[in-house]
Image: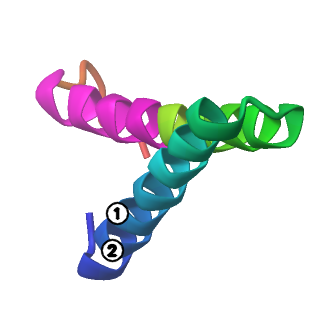
Amino acid sequence: MSKEKAYQFFRLVERMRKAQKEYFRCKTSAYLNESKRLEKEVDAEINRVNNLLLDRQQPKLFNEQ
């Protein structure tokens, strides 16, 4: 992961946590929806990176390109 991607992920998590805290403080549907949306983005990025790492760990049977 490049420094820029890592920074973007850090900021995404920061926004997610802020929205979660605001939801628990105010209990509004707007903050809940924002929290869920950001959580999906975080989960998608975690899955993307996990898949990349898994691909690097598994040897290739054929010379795929």
Q: Which residue in the rendered view is the most extreme toward the front?
A: 26
Could you tell me which secondary element the residue under label 1 belongs to?
A: helix
Quarter location, residue 64: top left
46 left or right of 33 in image: left
Q: Which residue in the rendered view is the most extreme toward the right?
A: 29
Tell me if residue 14 can be seen: yes
Disc on res. 61: none
Q: Residue at x 24, y 78 (%)?
A: 3
Q: Amino acid at mark 1?
A: Phe
Residue 53 drawn in magenta:
yes
Asked whether 63 or 29 is in front, the reply is 29
* CB-based contact (under 8 Å), mark 1 and mark 2: yes
Q: Residues within 10 Å of mark 1 (few under 14, many from 20)?
A: few
Q: Residue at x 43, y 46 (%)?
A: 65
- Per the image, the residue denoted by label 1 is 10
Q: Which residues are magenta?
A: 45-58
- Per the image, the residue denoted by label 2 is 7
- The majority secondary structure of the magenta stretch comes to helix
Q: Amino acid at mark 2?
A: Tyr
Q: Residue at x 33, y 74 (%)?
A: 7
Residue 62, x across and y down, in percent: 30, 25
Asked whether 29 or 63 is in front, the reply is 29
Q: Residues within 10 Å of mark 2 (few under 14, many from 20)?
A: few
